[in-house]
Amino acid sequence: MNVLGFDTSGAATSACVLRSDGRAFELRPAPAALFERPAHASELLPRVADVLEQAGLDWPQLDAIGVGVGPGAFTGLRIGIATARALASARGLDLRPVSSLAALAAGVDAPLALPLIDARRGQLFGALYEQGTERWPPFAATPEELAERVRTAGITPLATGDGSIRFRELLEAAGIRVEPDDSASHVVSALHVCRLATGVLAREPGSVLPEYLRPPDAKPRSQ
């Protein structure tokens, strides 16, 4: 199966093609991109074109699109998922939604992986994975709430993601290990999106929606 995958849950835009022969062609930003101004609208399609060219594939040779559905930033998820839905519909491709937290956890080399995405408002989006299996389902919590939960559970997970960098000091005080700031594991890998997508059932494009976990920051004004 030839799979195109991408993720826009954070400020960084990652894209990858995983070919049926196992070769992967990925554009994965440096961790510093997580703290820059998001540019998904201008970056996503050019990066998709780049990885397709690197892989030596054209649209008719693709079988599926895997897309990170969050949780994460409202605007980023909306751009990524809308793009995935449009491409899948136009090209007649399977669309396979992937948890951005699961893709982030897949890059952690530890028995207990704690992917953490900065949710703003002083909160984190996270989940706990044990050897790739979800142990704690996705949640939104303050760093203090997460620290207390980890202390109560008596575990020492390895955390990654922009949320773990932002709240490193507080998390480490609770016994949570955090990857070095320059670790590539802090960025959701589109390669892991592709790999996870191969094990996900295809969905109708219109049914693929963002996993926000909470209402968006921006709310419509009352009339």
Image: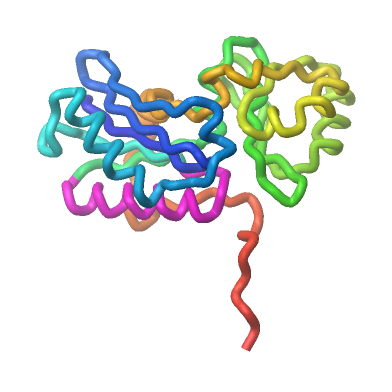
Q: How is the image coloured?
A: rainbow
Depicted 14 relative to depicted 84: above or below: above
Residue found at the very far top of the displayed protein: 110
Screen quadrant of the C terminus: bottom right
Image side of residue 27 versus residue 132, left or right:
left
Res. 199 visible in picture: no
Q: Could you tell me residue 160's position as x and y percent? A: 63, 24
Q: As rendered, which of 20 and 190 lies closer to the eye? A: 190
Q: Is residue 129 above or below residue 98?
A: above
Q: Position of residue 98 (x, y in %)?
A: 45, 36
Q: Quadrant of residue 169?
A: top right
Instruction: State which quadrant residue 52 falls in.
Output: top left
Which residue is pictured at 35% across the width and 39% down the height? Answer: 96
Left or right placement of residue 90 versus residue 217 in this view = left
Does the segment drawn in magenta span residue 176? no
At horizontal 41% and vertical 47% (from top left) the residue drawn is 40
- Which segment did they paint magenta? 69-92
Percent of width and height locating residue 26: 33, 24
Q: x%, y% of residue 35?
A: 59, 37
- In the depicted view, which residue is nearer to us: 52 or 88? 52
Name the residue nearer the viewer: 173 or 34.
34
